[in-house]
Every structure is written in structure tokens, then in C-alpha cells.
């Protein structure tokens, strides 16, 4: 394997806690440079990586002649300009979600990357959860029959949520969306990946539950311009319907990611808080392939709980950590032809849903996709 030389743009929590740690677990990846306007964040990142070149301006980092790949870990408003600059330099990209502020930006990023032959990935990281991979296997097998309905939510909530200082995620010009785009983008991608379908129509409702938040330093109130919670009702291309929630306001739930999918012959219930098990109801010939850890089949407990098989657990032998979506991207990086999902195309698909939801709420109507 040849070495993949990586630059990190944005040194915040997601860069340090996910991107850097994932690259460090890949023997053929070497982080050579990082960029952030905050010297303290850069310092914390360098503590993880060891000495490397640091920059305050992403354009200076991209001007290097030894970069193969960049991770874009900035505020959402910077994804588009950084990606377009990287594409112009012929540098491959792994980007945080959502892909951009607007659908037009996302489409431009995808079109430019395709035209330049750029390898792309987007950090819809929860596809790697072991129980989600098992759910995908079961759905792809046809064990549930034609899918009729799905509900999916990704939410967080704390009793202190209402008094927290404002962050960039509460500012539309920086984030684009709040709970519906931040949490919701993950769960929209998860749902469409699991059921292998597209959205054909959507309607939506959002709420700003805390209209003002204090500025961290001064304590002065600042207006919130992104939603705390969003709900979407969808029609899917497989004739199913779906209900999706992205929220910051599920008090006491912590990070709460759940998906239920029901078909003509069975159903499944996924809960990320239980990443190595799945609740299922399906024909015995499919059920017998898996290890039951809780037996159902009764009127008061119709669903069985099955164990995620080792092939989907993603635990690296001899290590205490699991494979990540970014590590999958690195493994696929030198494949010919390069094939990886989720990439910019999946990012555009989610951006289409978010923008259609905003339009649907403004019109108080259904919006047809693709728009």
C-alpha cells in the first residue's frame, strides 16, 4: 500500500475525536498538516498526531504539493469554498455533513468533483454501527417483504439545553440547519441506505424552541436562527411512507438514534444504544440464521432479539476499537475503480431532502422530489 498524505482542515472536536483517531488507525495514512483559525484547537490536535505543519488559512494548506486527501471538519458554511479549492488542486476529499449550506452548493461540489475525478466521502458515520449493518443485511435479503413504513429519529436532549450559550450551530449563516440538518442528515441517509429507496415527496415542520441564547463571553442574548427540532413526512420510491425526526430537544435521552421498519412479512427495531443486537420479527427460515438472545413469538413479546454476527461487529482483532466509516474510505482509496459510499452523491441526496423540507414548510404543502 502506498502512503496517503492527509491534511485536516478544522481542528475542533469532530476532527480530534473522529477524523484524526481514524487516520491514526490506518497504516497507510499519514497526517502531514492541519489548519484552524484557533491556535488552541490546533495545539490539541497536534498532541494527538505528534509534530506536523500547521496553518491558519486553508488556502495555504491546500497550496502544498504533497497532499493526497483532506478532511473538511469546519463549520458548514466553509464546506463549499474549501471543497471547491481542493478540487481545483486535484486533492481528494472526505467531508463532514451536511455537505453544504444549500442544494445548489452541494450539486456544484458533486459536479466539480466528478469532472475532476476526485474521490469523495461524506461522514455519515452511523452506517458503521454493527446493528445497522445487520439491519441492512436483513432488508437486502428480502426477509421483511416489501417495506410499508419506516420511522427514524436522531435526537439529543439535556435538562440544561435551554440555557446553553449560543454556538455556530444556532446560526443559519454558519450551519444552514439546526436539529433537522445536523442530527437529521445522519438519519435521512441511514433510512434511505437501509431501505434502498429515494424520497419522492416530503412535507415538514420545524420549531425554534429557544429563540435567544446568551453569547458565551458577554452573556448578551443572541437570536437563534436554526431549528431546535424538525419533523419530516416522506413518500418513498418503493411505495413506503416514512416519518423522520432530527432534534436537540429530547430531554434526558442523551444521543438517541432509533429506526423501525415494517414490511409485509416482518419488521425490525434498531436502537444505537444497543449496537450489538437487533429486535426482529420475520419468517422462521430467515430468523434461524441468527443467534437469539431473547426469544419472542408470544402475544406480549412478538419480537425476538438477535445478536449481531461477528462479521458485522467491526471489531479489529487485538484492539479495543471498531472500524469507522472513514477507515472504510481509506481502505477503498486505492481500489481500481474507486468505489465508496457514502460520497458526495449521497450528500446531495440528503441536501435535496433538507431543502425540500424547508420549502414544504414555507408553502405548508407537499414538495415533489427531485426538485
Image (cartoon, helix red, strand yellow):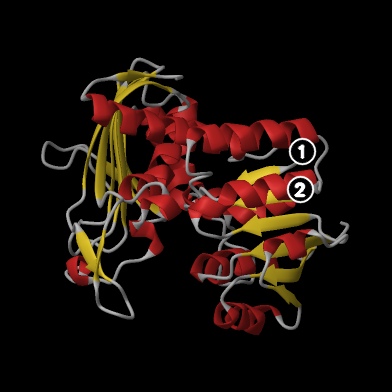
| Quadrant position of the N terminus in the picture | bottom right
CB within 8 Å, label 2 to label 1: yes
Of 187 and 344, which appears nearest the observer?
344
Q: Is residue 157 left or right of residue 369?
A: left
Q: Is residue 12 left or right of residue 255?
A: right
Residue density around tag 2, few if under 14, some if 14–19, many if 20 or more, within 10 Å: some
Q: Residue at x 71, y 34 (%)?
A: 112
Q: Which residue is mark 2?
A: 333
Instruction: For marks 2 and 1, give the CA distance.
Output: 6 Å
Most distant residue in the left direction? 300
Q: Percent from the top left, x then y, of residue 155?
A: 29, 53
Q: Residue at x 61, y 78 (%)?
A: 42
Look at the image and tell me whether residue 131 can be seen. Answer: yes
Mark 2 or mark 1, which has the lower sequence index?
2
Q: Residue at x 42, y 55 (%)?
A: 276
Q: Percent from the top left, x then y, of residue 108?
A: 62, 33
The correct choice, above or below, for 4 with respect to 342 in the image is below
| Quadrant position of the C terminus in the picture | top left
Q: Percent from the top left, x then y, of residue 124?
A: 51, 48
Of 333 and 278, which appears nearest the observer?
333
Circle 2 SS class = loop
Circle 1 SS class = loop
The correct choice, above or below, for 324 with respect to 199 in the image is below
Q: Which residue is mark 1?
A: 338
Q: Is residue 315 left or right of residue 261?
A: right
Q: Percent from the top left, x then y, of residue 265?
A: 31, 22
Q: Is residue 350 left or right of residue 56?
A: left
Q: Residue at x 27, y 64 (%)?
A: 254
Amino acid at each position: 500500500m502506498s502512503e496517503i498524505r492527509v491534511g485536516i482542515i478544522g481542528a475542533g472536536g469532530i476532527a480530534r475525536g473522529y477524523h484524526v483517531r481514524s487516520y491514526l488507525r490506518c497504516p497507510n495514512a499519514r497526517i502531514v498538516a492541519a489548519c484552524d483559525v484557533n491556535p488552541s484547537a490546533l495545539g490539541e490536535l497536534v498532541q494527538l498526531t505528534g509534530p506536523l505543519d500547521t496553518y491558519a488559512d486553508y488556502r495555504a494548506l491546500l497550496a502544498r504539493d504533497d497532499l493526497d486527501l483532506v478532511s473538511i471538519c469546519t463549520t458548514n458554511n466553509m464546506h463549499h469554498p474549501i471543497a471547491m479549492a481542493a478540487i481545483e488542486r486535484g486533492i481528494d476529499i472526505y467531508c463532514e455533513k451536511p455537505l453544504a449550506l444549500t442544494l445548489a452548493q452541494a450539486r456544484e461540489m458533486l459536479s466539480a468533483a466528478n469532472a475532476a475525478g476526485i474521490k469523495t466521502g461524506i461522514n455519515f458515520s452511523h452506517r458503521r454501527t454493527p446493528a445497522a449493518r445487520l439491519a441492512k443485511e436483513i432488508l437486502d435479503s428480502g426477509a421483511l417483504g416489501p417495506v410499508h413504513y419506516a420511522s427514524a429519529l436522531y435526537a439529543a436532549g439535556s435538562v440544561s439545553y435551554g440555557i446553553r450559550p449560543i454556538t455556530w450551530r444556532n446560526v443559519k449563516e454558519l450551519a444552514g440547519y439546526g436539529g433537522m440538518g445536523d442530527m437529521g442528515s445522519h438519519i435521512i441517509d441511514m433510512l434511505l441506505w437501509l431501505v434502498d429507496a429515494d424520497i419522492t415527496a416530503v412535507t415538514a415542520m420545524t420549531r425554534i424552541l429557544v429563540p435567544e441564547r446568551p453569547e458565551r463571553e458577554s452573556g448578551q442574548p443572541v437570536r437563534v436562527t436554526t431549528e431546535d427540532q424538525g419533523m419530516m413526512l416522506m413518500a418513498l420510491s418503493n411505495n413506503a411512507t416514512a416519518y423522520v425526526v432530527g432534534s436537540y430537544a429530547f430531554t434526558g435521552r442523551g444521543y438517541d438514534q432509533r429506526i423501525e421498519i415494517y414490511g409485509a412479512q416482518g419488521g425490525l427495531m434498531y436502537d444505537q444504544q444497543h449496537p450489538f443486537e437487533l429486535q426482529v420479527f420475520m419468517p422462521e427460515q430467515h430468523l434461524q440464521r441468527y443467534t437469539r438472545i431473547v426469544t419472542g413469538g408470544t402475544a406480549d413479546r412478538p419480537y425476538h432479539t438477535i445478536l449481531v454476527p461477528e462479521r458485522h461487529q467491526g471489531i479489529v482483532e487485538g484492539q479495543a476499537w471498531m472500524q469507522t466509516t472513514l477507515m472504510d474510505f481509506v481502505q477503498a482509496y486505492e481500489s481500481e475503480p474507486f468505489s465508496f459510499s457514502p460520497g458526495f452523491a449521497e450528500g446531495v441526496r440528503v441536501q435535496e431532502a433538507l431543502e425540500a423540507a424547508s420549502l414544504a414548510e414555507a408553502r405548508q404543502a407537499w414538495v415533489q422530489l427531485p426538485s
